[in-house]
Amino acid sequence: MTRRLPAWRNSVSFLRPDRLIVLALCCLLLVAATALAQTDPLPSWNEGPAKQAILAFVRATTDPSNPSYVRPEARIATFDQDGTTWVEQPMYTPMLYCLARLRELAKDKPELAGAEPFKSLLSGGLERLADASTDDIVKLYAATMTGMTVEELGNQVRRWLDTARDARWGRPYTELVYQPMLEVMQLLRAHGYKTYFVTGGGQDFLRAYAEKVYGVPPEQVVGTLNATKFGYDAAGKAVLTEEPRLLLNNVGPGKPQGIHLMIGRHPQAAFGNSDGDKEMLEYAQAGGGARLMMLVRHDDAEREYAYAAQSKIGTFPDSLLAEAAQKGWVVISMKQDWKRIFSWE
Amino acid sequence: MTRRLPAWRNSVSFLRPDRLIVLALCCLLLVAATALAQTDPLPSWNEGPAKQAILAFVRATTDPSNPSYVRPEARIATFDQDGTTWVEQPMYTPMLYCLARLRELAKDKPELAGAEPFKSLLSGGLERLADASTDDIVKLYAATMTGMTVEELGNQVRRWLDTARDARWGRPYTELVYQPMLEVMQLLRAHGYKTYFVTGGGQDFLRAYAEKVYGVPPEQVVGTLNATKFGYDAAGKAVLTEEPRLLLNNVGPGKPQGIHLMIGRHPQAAFGNSDGDKEMLEYAQAGGGARLMMLVRHDDAEREYAYAAQSKIGTFPDSLLAEAAQKGWVVISMKQDWKRIFSWE
């Protein structure tokens, strides 16, 4: 005799334990998604036009029924680093690294310490560095960040970041990241955006910590590019060595060039803080449709820094402010728009 | 009197209609996933060591309990294009484009038609092109693929692809894609791999059709790189113009350099077909752990082509075969491993 199950048992028999687990996970995800939707995704931002511009942009470009909808493949957001996602005063951190590394190398290499521009850079410190020509910087970069394998460079940078401390707060540089900007990156990623860095600093410098600190993988770091050389180590293993040959100076007009090289699309959103980001924002806007262009304005001497228009670091001339107003770019006031600046505040 | 629901009704009350829809979708996904798992993901491949190597690699690197597991962020696979994912005989398609474009331009520019290397390229056809020096090719590239905006170049390439036909099959070049390799790309992507092209052809040439033909977005196309120039059009809109300045010749040792520049990691899997891919495969393997290196061998004169070791196009010397055997790279025999070559067969 065949034992027949009642109809309801039959229909429930689909629910084998393994499938039940998947179903349960789906339900949990559902609950989590609902909970998330009710939480403020930008808790470190004060209410105001900047916060509203970000939220409206994300809503418009990810809602399929909105005329400004952007298909997931084209969701690209680019961020400058120094001054936009972390502190750049009194000097860009990648430059601080080069200077620290130069001091270290100079101990064993008097011929390096005695030659210009190194001699005056070593004695003149940050002020001399702020006045350095592009040529000086290229030489400093070549002396400190080339000649080793790409892996060795990454290790050297991470070792320095582990021990170096900022003079004002006494903290590692990687703790001087702006919490509000981290939230913007996370919000964008949660809505299918790929977040890229487009920095004037060296590509392999930022790659050494971008994934850990910002959640940005190495293939999404556009920076100032130098050539590498292919070869083999003593064991016959393929290696790449950093070469002192500049391929792209990723500043100003170099930023759209770097974006085209590594991304090949106009960014849908672009975030900067100085005249070195102007062309990146213009290039984002040139893509047409719903684009978000934002500039961080350093106007909070108490909690961070307030730069004059003529500051050598992170220059923000009045002409940039005028262009922003004319083109509908959104200026973020650190003082007014950010509830807190660092995660540890 | 309070009407009390039976316990089971109470527990089911969570299932509001909107949530039921989501649950139903989850169940459908589950069923679809089960169905997919039972289908052969590589239907155009014959059973054999090549197919098994691909399936074993995907299983090992995506199963969290396997010692060779690779976290999703590091799942990168790189593919050469010409000869690896589409036909490269009797001449690389990007070169055919340059020659066709040169013929078109020469009609209106006798000064171009009369100067070398263009004069002999126009009269000598494919044979002259196969003997062209790197310097000749750079000049041909500069004459035909620079001077216009990056958007105009993409449009010119797409217009040509729409009408140009291959001499042997009379089909568009984009139909000469190898169906078995498309299946490998799809299988890898279904398992969280990012599929990149690493081609000797121009980056912006391949970008013009990579997304449509291969499902590879522009940011995952590494190619031979030229500089661009930033400027503004008549309406004041930011534009990039293709410049005749070579930044990276993405062939041989240039491939690991291009990979580092655009990806910054060793590929977990790399696919090529000639000595121009040797260094890319070596660099993938140098990353250590479970890596898959494969070379397509053209040994099927009937269905596609069979190249001699000394072929100028897609050279596959015996030394490469020996290196593959020594290092555990897998050689794909088109004749034995591929059930069909093109989707329309």
Image: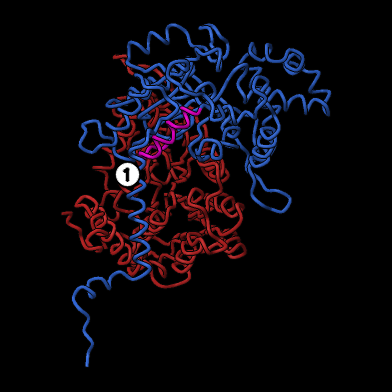
Chain colours: A blue, B red
> Residue A280 at what x, y percent from top left?
42, 22
Left/right of residue B233 with respect to residue A274 in the rendered view: left
Q: Quadrant of the C terminus of chain A?
A: top right
Left/right of residue B47 with respect to residue B282 in the rendered view: left
Q: Magenta span: helix, strand or loop, mainly?
A: helix
Identify the residue at horizontal 23%, vertical 87% (top origin): A3
Magenta span includes A35: no
Chain letter of the residue carrying label 1 = A
Identify the residue at horizontal 32%, vertical 32% (top origin): A58
Left/right of residue B91 with respect to residue A316 in the rendered view: left
Identify the residue at horizontal 34%, vertical 40% (top origin): A73
Residue furthest bottom in the image: A1
> Which secondary structure lies at badge 1?
helix
Residue furthest front in the image: B1
Number of other residues with Cα within 10 Å of mark 1, as a class: few under 14, some 14 to 19, many 20 or more:
few
Above-or-below relation of A2 to B134: below
| Any part of residue B104 in sight | yes
Residue position for label 1: A34
The stretch in magenta equals A179-194
In the figure, residue A152 lies in which quadrant?
top right
Magenta span includes A182: yes
> Residue B117 at what x, y percent from top left?
45, 33
Residue toward you, B304 or B124: B304
Residue toward you, B328 or B142: B328
> Residue A299 at what x, y percent from top left?
49, 12
Q: Quadrant of the N terminus of chain A?
A: bottom left
Above-or-below relation of A5 to B184: below
> Residue A285 at what x, y percent from top left?
34, 22
Residue toward you, A201 or B318: A201
Identified by mark 1, the residue type is Thr
